[in-house]
Image: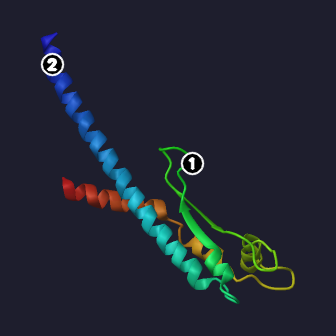
Amino acid sequence: MAWNDGITEEMAGFLEDVSKAAGGARKIAESVIDSEVQSFSERIRERVPVATGGLRDSFKVTRDASRGRNWYGYDASFEGNAPNGQPYQKIANVLNYGTPQHAGTQFVSNAVRKLKGMDDRIEARIEAELSQRT
């Protein structure tokens, strides 16, 4: 099967190139996600209503690796309880969405809205970086 050797070598080279490009694209996507999450965290911390600072200080963003190696993401939440025993997450939800008596501040909703279009930003960065390599 000597006639197949050239094709096999060419295919192996092609698959190696595709594998390298995919790995590079994943690293680029992860970099964009990291940057967007950092900006998201800063927006939340800047806009959270502050009475004592407890709610702001309870906001935590952690890398979530529990879903396996093919998933990349973060968990963001308000952890713990206020001195009066109320969970900070509940306080954040009430302040964000409001109640029938008080309008919400939308500080979380506005920060989440800024994440819209992240997939397009990831795609544009991948295309820009890959075009520089060729």
Tag 2 and tag 1, C-beta contact below 8 Å = no
Height in image: 71 above or below 73? above
In the rendered view, does 85 fall on the left or right side of 23?
right
Residue 105 horizontal/vertical position (percent): 70, 83
Q: Secondary structure at mark 1?
A: loop
Question: What residue is shown at x 50% (from left), y 48% (from top)?
Answer: 71
In the rendered view, does 42 fall on the left or right side of 130?
right
**Residue found at the very far right of the displayed protein:** 101
| Amino acid bearing label 2 | Asp
Residue, disc 1:
66
Label 2 or label 1, whichever lies nearer to me, is 1
Residue 44 horizontal/vertical position (percent): 59, 78
Question: What residue is shown at x 53% (from left), y 68% (from top)?
Answer: 115
Height in image: 122 above or below 94? above
Residue, disc 2:
5
Decide if residue 121 is in sight here. no
Height in image: 64 above or below 104? above
Give the colour scheme of this rendering.
rainbow
Question: What residue is shown at x 61% (from left), y 76% (from top)?
Answer: 110
- Mark 2 or 1, nearer chain start: 2
